[in-house]
Each structure stands twice: as structure tokens, then as C-alpha cells.
Amino acid sequence: MATTTKIQPRALVRASGGPRYAVALAVDALGTGLLRPFLLLYGVTVLRLSAPVTGIAMTAGVVVGLVCMPAVGRWLDRGARSTVVAASMLVRVLGVALLLATPTGNVWLFAAAALFLGIGNQAWPAGHAALVATVAHGRERDAALAGGRVLRNAGLGAGALLATACLAGGTTALQALAAVTGLAYLAAAALAWSVHVHAHPAAAAASDRDDEPAPRMRALLAANVIYAFCLNVPEIALPLVLVTQMHASPVWSAAIFVANTVLVVTLQVPVTILMSRFPRRSVLAIAGVVLTASYLGFLAATFLGHGWGAPAVAAVSVVCTIGEIIYAGSATALVTALAPAHVLGRALARFQLSTGFGLAVSPAVITTLASHGSAALWGSLAAATLLSASAVAR
């Protein structure tokens, strides 16, 4: 079994699509970081919509955006690569334009803007993964996918910090941030399109067995819905538990979120390369075990009381982030390794559907479970994740 124990930064950039594509990813992530954390605030403060109405419109945009994934998968299987990535960025330009054009109190235009932003956000991961799988192979591809996640998380974090610094300007600053986001998406789309990466589906189909069906991956996709919950643990579950159940300062939640981002940026590529000595399916199962252990750790931390509870949660969150890193470094890579080249797009689209569904339902599930106590929340997450890891291992 081939493994990757070391990869040079220049080779990593080349395997990720080249320097121009790396710049496109960075610009796109920076723009997303400027707006995404404050889209709810934009609806409430700039458009004067109620918080529940704004939240429903944003959720609907994410869920309806998933409907486009089958079409994206078929487009990718016709050979499109950089074009799909550029299109996912351009459709978000339209979303930002609608956002800026929305008059005060108009929920329908805001919902339309959220829909186009949701379509772009859902289509991008599949397009990006397919592009990387076209220009890189084997374990180098796994490292390149991990490198793309690092670049994206760094851009999101930088954008969010910049936007936070600008919030003192009130509604005018939020509108300016939206405009800058639109320009960033437009620039990123132009850079991504200029890469001109295209697959040759006819040749790919000929190299695969003609009678080989597209992998259903039912167990993997079902497990991925549960695995995806870990991505919302630092943003939703931990703040909810720390503030409402443990009555800790919100500073703990902010510190955990920052630590999560820093750990992902610094460890994603090294951990992915380190785990390349094991089969991808085994690595994904290991991620489930690590996440399960972290959920049980959060449960134990809730019994430590007010003084030690918050520091314990912060310490366990490092374990949870390690599990997230292992999961993110192996899940998409496993799909690209399992799928025949001529159906790679549809396989990635189905995988993104499962990820998007998990991210869409996890806030409601987490808040509902948390209302029944810490044992219900962390016990349920631990049991479901361990069951998912078992399904992946089999």
C-alpha cells in the first residue's frame, strides 16, 4: 500500500490545482469569512427582519441548495472541473447582489439571496474535490484535499476577524462587507475558471469496467450524516452547554472556536499525511472512535461543577478537533478512492448531500437533545457516532 510520509509545499500547491487555483481558494474563503458569520446579523440589523424569520430563510437556503447536487454531479461526470468551481463562486456573486438589492423588510428577496449563497456553498466542495482528484492521485491527492481545507479555514478565520473589526461601523459596515464579499467571489471565480482543468469522461469510462456500477456507499453516506455533526460541535453544542447549562463566560466558547480553527490550520495536513500509512476506511473508523471519546469526555466534564467544568470542556475540545481533523482528512479521500472515475461527480455529489443534510439538521437535533440534559446530548452523539464508526469499519 502506497503511503505519503512527506510532501513539499510546492508539490502540495501543484497537487491542489496550482498557484492560481490556490489564490482563488484563498480569496473565496476570505470573502465567505467576511459575510457568512454575520449573515443573520445582516438580516436583523440592516433589513430589519425578525431573528426567527431570518434564521428560517437562511436554513431554507441551505436545504434547498442541496437539491442542486444531483445536477452538479452529472455536470462533473461530463468532465467539468474548474468550470463547476467557478460557477459555484459566481452563483454566490448573484446571492450577494440580491442581498444588497433587498429593501428593508423584504424577506423574499433575502430568502432568494440565501438560496443562491446556499447553492454555491453546497456545490463548491464537490467541484473542488473533483478538480483535485483530476490533477492529483493516490495519497498525494489526500494531502492536497487536506491542504485545501487548511487554506479555506485560514481564509474563513481571517475574513471573520476582519469583519468583526469592521462591525463598529454598524449597518453601513455590514453593507460594505457584503459588497466586498461579492467582489471577492467574482475575483475568485475568474481565477478558478482561468485554471482550465477538464476531465475526459469518455477516456475515464473506457479505463473502468463498463459494467461497474456507481458505488452506492449507503453505509458510508449514512455514517457521514452523523460524523458531520462534529463540525457544528464547536459552534453550536459547546456554546450552548457552556453558557446555558454550565453558566460559564462566553469567553470560553470564543476561545474554543479560535483554538479549533488554529488546530485545523496547523495540523490538518500533517495528521492526514501521518494517517496515510493506514487504509482510508480504517482511518475514518478511527475518527469515529476519537469523536466518541470526546463526546464522553464532554459528558464527564459537565459533572465537574462550575469551577472545573469549563476548563475541562476546553481540554476535551482539543480531542474533538483531532477527531474532526482525522474525519475531514479521510472521508472525501475515501469517496474519491472508491468511486470509478466516470461516476466520480455523482459519488461526490451524494457525499455532499449527506454532509449538507447532517449540517442542516444538526443544530435542531443538538438543541433538542440539549434541552433534555447533558446525558441525552453527549450520550446520544457518542452512541450514534460509535455505531457509525462500526458501520464504516465493516
Image: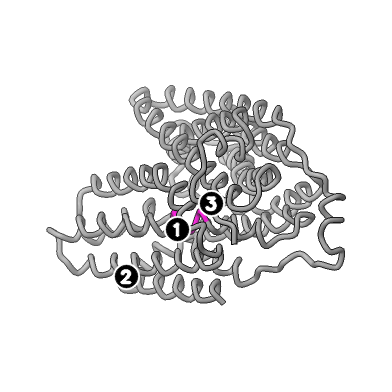
Task: Assign the C terminus to one quadrant of the image.
Answer: bottom right
Disc 2 to disc 3: CB gap under 8 Å: no
Helix, strand or loop at disc 3?
loop
Disc 2 to disc 1: CB gap under 8 Å: no
Which of the two residues, 362 or 320, is positioned nearer the viewer here?
Answer: 320
The residue type indicated by label 1 comes to Pro
Q: Residue tagged by mark 2?
A: 296
Q: Residue tagged by mark 1?
A: 363
Residue numbers of the magenta segment: 324-329
**Image depth: mark 2 or mark 1 in front:** 2
Residue positioned 67% across, 59% down in the render: 350
Q: Is residue 184 above or below residue 385?
A: above
Q: Earlier in the sequence, mark 3 or mark 1?
A: 3
The residue type indicated by label 3 comes to Thr
Residue 332 sits inside the magenta stretch? no
On the image, the x and y values in percent for residue 114 come to 58, 41
**Image depth: mark 2 or mark 3 in front:** 3
Q: Residue tagged by mark 3?
A: 4
Tell me if mark 3 has few (under 14), some (14-19) or many (20+) residues whose alpha carbon lies within 10 angstroms of its own: some
Q: Is residue 6 above or below residue 242?
A: above
On the image, the x and y values in percent for residue 289 come to 41, 69
